[in-house]
Amino acid sequence: MAVYTDVNEGELTAFLKAYPVGELLSYKGIAEGTENSNFLVHASTGSYILTLYEKRVDKADLPFFLGLMGHLARKGISCPLPVTAHDGTVIGTLAGRPAVIITFLEGLSLRRPTAAHCAEVGKALAGLHLAGQDFQMRRPNALAIDGWRKLWAASRERADEVEPGLAAEVDADFSDFERNWPTGLPQGIIHADLFPDNVFFLGEKLSGLIDFYFACDDLYAYDVATCLNAWCFEKDFSFNLTKGAALLSGYQSVRPLSGEEKAALPMLARGSALRFMLTRLYDWLTIPDGGLVMKRDPTEYIRRMRFHRAIKSPSEYGLT
Ligand SMILES: Nc1ncnc2c1ncn2[C@@H]1O[C@H](COP(=O)(O)OP(=O)(O)OP(=O)(O)O)[C@@H](O)[C@H]1O
Ligand SMILES: N[C@@H](CCO)C(=O)O
């Protein structure tokens, strides 16, 4: 349950006076999410999400994340728009935490996306990449190879408790990535965490993208690879070729991939699977059971790493 910090009515009413949202009508904590405390706020001008940033988000990154959401929303991407306070600022303080109000998006995230949903996600991801091209702020990816190495150094000793042989397997991957990680591919702003819980749909139509708190500068094709991992595998860890083909053709209908980007997909998908395996493994080993932070299963991503290692041609993802 992601309400780490309680907010009482008096302090919320006082906080909201700084923003053009009208009178507070009601509010409640939101259980989903793991990084921050989120509340659904009904005010006289409409519904909003109140986010209090907890310690897993670096405060120095907030202007980038919020600036990016504002930029994308103004360019027509369906994502939350941070509400600017009467004094021109966006980030306030509530219950001792940095806090913002963002617009509420209608829609539901999906547990069982279909190929049609995957096509929509591909299109939206490419639209986001194009819309980010003239965003002026930069943020290096904290979870690129150097970041993975730090997580691995903190987890390696106990990795075999989760899966026997994992330490040797990941060590070999690191040497491979050091030699073969693609360079020189097109890059720019990426979402970096576009999982089904961060995409809303109304029926088959995509209605919103949320949670930009991993967004950064990196390879566009790496973001595509992350979506293949997050959207196109079934519960039994098999890759669904129809979903892969739908996601990739949706993406390419808006931003065609170059030959180099296509060729790099297996390596990028392996790297992306390792990145999510490592953050999950680190949490698995370090966060106490029964706490507020929901731990996700790292083994789901060990299976994906193995799948990508065995890929001989990017056409196996459904590329045409
Ligand atoms: N703009 C929005 N409109 C509607 N609902 C939202 C919006 N932003 C967040 N939510 C709701 O709040 C939940 C948590 O949001 P979010 O995913 O940003 O949190 P988080 O703590 O950063 O979580 P995580 O990074 O683990 O996904 C979402 O699952 C969604 O239900
Ligand atoms: N999408 C991540 C969680 C962080 O947002 C995962 O599934 O591991």
Image (cartoon, rainbow, N blue to C red):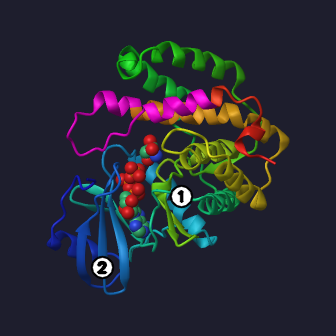
What residue is rendered at 54% in x and 49% in y? 215
In this view, 2 is above or below 147: below
Position in image of residue 222 (x %, y %): 65, 41
What residue is rendered at 63% in x and 36% in y? 269
| 302 or 274, nearer to the observer | 302
* Alpha-carbon span between mark 2 and mark 1: 29 Å
Query: What count of labels does the image hold?
Result: 2
Q: Quadrant of residue 19?
A: bottom left
As shown in the figure, which amino acid type bears the numbered disc 1? Pro
> What are the residue bounds of the magenta stretch?
281-307
Position in image of residue 201 (x %, y %): 52, 68
> Where on the image, by quarter, is ligand 2?
top left
Q: Quadrant of residue 251?
A: bottom right
Q: Residue furthest bottom?
A: 44
The crowd level at tag 1 (other Cα within 10 Å; few <14, some 14-19, many 20+) is: some
| 230 or 139, nearer to the observer | 230
Position in image of residue 232 (x %, y %): 59, 48
| 90 or 80, nearer to the observer | 80
The crowd level at tag 2 (other Cα within 10 Å; few <14, some 14-19, many 20+) is: some
* Disc 1: residue Cβ within 8 A of ligand 2's nearest atom: no
Residue at numbered disc 1 = 113
Residue at numbered disc 2 = 42
Q: Which mark is in front, 2 or 1?
A: 1
What residue is rendered at 79% in x and 48% in y? 257
Mark 2 or mark 1, earlier in chain = 2
